[in-house]
Image (cartoon, rainbow, N blue to C red):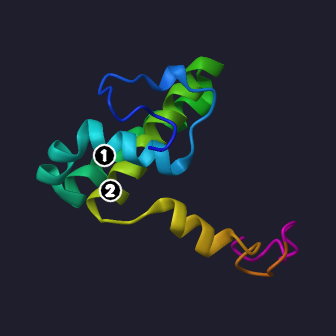
Amino acid sequence: MSEMNAENDTNDVADLADISMADFQALIRKMYYTKDAERGIDGTFMWLLEEIGELAAALRSGTAADRAEEFADVLAWLVTIANVAEVDLSSAIRNKYGSGCPGCGQYACQCADSEKP
C-alpha cells in the first residue's frame, strides 16, 4: 500500500484523497485475508452474490448513499475473492483493458451492440 504509512496499522482509508486498486486490494488483504482464506473461494463467492443482490435492490429503489455503499461492498467482496485466488487485480485489469477494448482494441469501444463489450 504505497500511500499508507506502513508503521501505523490503524491507518484509515478515509485519510486518503484517492486509493488505487493495488492499495485497496492490499488493504482488504490486510483486514480480512485470514478469515477469507479459511472461508475459501466458494464461500466467499456466495457472499459476493449476496452483495450483488443488495446492489440490485439499491439500484431499483435505494438512495444514492445506499447505491454507493453497495457498490463498495461488491467491489470489496470481488477483491476478497481475487486475494484468495492469488490474482493481482491491477495487473489483470492492465493486461485485459490497458490497450483498449478487448473486442475491438479501441479506447472508445466500436464493437457492434450485439457483441459482449
Residue 54 in picture, x, y percent from top left: 45, 33
Residue drawn at x 41%, y 50% is 79
- The rendered magenta stretch, by its main secondary structure, is classed as loop
The residue lying furthest to the bottom in this view is 104
Marks 2 and 1 sit apart, C-alpha to C-alpha, by: 6 Å
The residue carrying mark 2 is: 83
Q: Position of residue 21 (x, y in %)?
A: 53, 49
| Image quarter hosting the C terminus | bottom right
Closer to the camera, 18 or 107? 18
Q: Which residues are magenta?
A: 107-117
Q: Is residue 7 left or right of residue 3?
A: left
Q: Is residue 54 visible?
A: yes
Rendered view: 105 above or below 35 = below
Q: Amino acid at mark 2?
A: Asn
Task: Name the secondary structure under disc 2.
Answer: helix
Q: Residues within 10 Å of mark 2 (few under 14, many from 20)?
A: many
Within 10 Å of disc 1 (Cα), the crowding (few <14, some 14-19, many 20+) is: some
* Position of residue 50 measured from the top left corner of the image (x, y, whole percent): 35, 41
- The answer, for residue 49, to whether it is visible in the render is no
Q: Residue at x 37, y 59 (%)?
A: 82
Q: Quadrant of the N terminus?
A: top left
Disc tally is 2
Q: Is 11 covered by the magenta stretch?
A: no
- The residue sitting at 74% across, 81% down in the picture is 103
Q: Decide which of tag 2 and tag 1 comes sooner along the chain.
A: 1
User: What amino acid is at disc 1?
Assistant: Arg
Contact between labelled residues 1 and 2, with CB atoms less than 8 Å apart:
yes
Camera-side residue: 24 or 71?
24
Judge whether residue 113 is colored magenta: yes
Residue assigned mark 1? 29
